[in-house]
Image: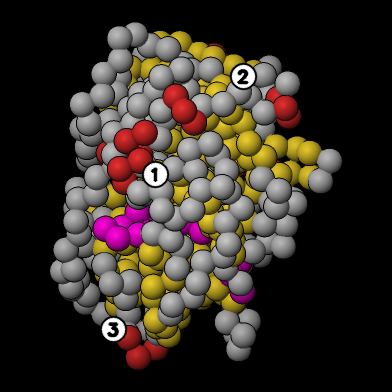
Amino acid sequence: MKRLYRRRGFLKLGSITTVSTLTTLAGATRNKPSLPPVQWSQLFNKGPGEIDSVILGNDGGFFIAGRTDAQAPWLAMLDTNGSVRWEKTLEQHLSPPGIVRTDSGYAVGTMYQKPDSDHPVVWFGLLDNDGSIRSAEITNTEVETPSGVSLSRGRHGYAFVVARRSAEWNWAVVTGFDTTGTHQWTTRYEIIYTPTFIESSQDGFVIGGEQERADAPWVSVIDGDGTKRWTKTAPVDENSSVTSGLVDDRGGIVLGEYGGLIRLTASGDVDWRRTYDVFVQDGKSSVPAVAQTAEGFVAATDEPKLTLLSVNRDGEQRETRTYDFECYLSDLIALASGAVLVVGERSTADGLTPWAALLADETPTVDPPTITPTTNTPVETTQSTPTDGDQSTDTPTSATSKTNTRTETTTEKSGGTGAAGPGFGVSTGIASVLGGAWLRSRSAEDD
């Protein structure tokens, strides 16, 4: 993908897709495969900027995260027409946020520049459904030059991964928080390895990334306390980049890589690996984003235009569809009805502008999202060393609350620009997210 090399060095995908996708798949059936047409395509007047992540909102609509023209992290709740219901920016923050749903709102992870420090650190916040920041934790986990973030929710808390870059090295830093938002542990991979997603598994988290040398990690699994369980390099003698991934409903790990998809078992063995002609153009392979559907998986790329591919559970191709506009794809979610929401940027006279599009049939429907409650079980750590060091061990370093800065706040949300307000509740929310009333024709920008 263009973003893989042109923008932040990699495509940040997948971490916010699996929970949203899987919770909308329960009981979903479709009579025949059909990749949907464009129902609407929306640009957001933020000047040059980007959308990096999208999840289903708790109260209906779509929750997006990205950056504005001032490079400030931008959070927004879209209504069912793609209009902004409320939005807010996070000042002194340096990276597009990773986002996930919680029992009563959202969790947000990003990088924060301390006024008295030369290096940014990890910031983790819990938000109410209206975007108000309920609490925030500023850790001592320093990052030389942050590049991209990804957040996931597990059984006992959250894990946040960021690429740490220096002149000679790239490496991954994974930070764990309990359900109250308190920093618990930090795990590092200090080799040439750029993480691109993190997903929750049954007992921990799966991390995938861009492999910059043949012996660098490619996929890694850690326990819920940050302990490394196993790490795999690419299954062939060549470099490989994983730009998106998910843990499917059978416990396997499905990854998007150059030219195709690969599925690993829960233990990391290759189940199947397939390439697709639609992702190989003029001898060049693009790297697809991937999400789960009721019948299998849907993969998408922006080379040379937005293209979707549907496959069954064994990775066998079903159909493809190319849409008549160019974009820079960042993320997608697949809904039970067969609809797909894609986000990213499109080129305009002002530069790259935040953009989203709904690909849907005439009468799509969505089941309300459900979240399995997490338990605030304390994690056991075996070290008490500070978390701002550069050591690399298989045992995570534990956090100490005395060195962290935690704030409780009642910050008001920014005013929304859409017609609908926060009162768009569950009764009229996701159960009707893709109802006919909100479907509108494609915007003039795509005419």
Determine contact: label 2, label 1, CB under 8 Å.
no
What quarter of the picture does the N terminus occupy?
top right
Query: What numbered label is drawn on residue 369?
Result: none
Instruction: Work out how far the residue at label 3 is from the one at label 2, CA to CA, in angstroms.
Output: 53 Å
Identify the residue under disc 1. 60
Whether residue 217 is visible here, answered yes or no, is no
x and y percent of residue 213 in the render?
53, 46
Callout 3: SS: loop
Front position in the image: 174 or 427? 427
Residue 106 painted magenta: yes
The quarter holding residue 314 reads top left
Instruction: Work out how far the residue at label 1 is from the one at label 3, CA to CA, in angstroms.
Output: 42 Å
Marks 1, 3: nearer the viewer: 1
Identify the residue under disc 3. 384
Q: Residues within 10 Å of mark 3 (few under 14, many from 20)?
A: few
What residue lies at 26% left-to-right and 67% top-to-bottom? 179
Identify the residue under disc 2. 323
Q: Which residues are magenta?
A: 92-108
Callout 2: SS: loop
x and y percent of residue 400 in the render?
32, 85
Above or below, 321 against 396 in this view is: above
Residue 422 painted magenta: no
Marks 3, 2: nearer the viewer: 2
Compared across the picture, whether 222 is left or right of 60 comes to left
What residue lies at 47% left-to-right and 22% top-to-bottom? 360
Instruction: Work out how far the residue at label 2 is from the one at label 1, CA to CA, in angstroms.
Output: 26 Å
Callout 1: SS: loop
- Residue type at the position of mark 1: Gly
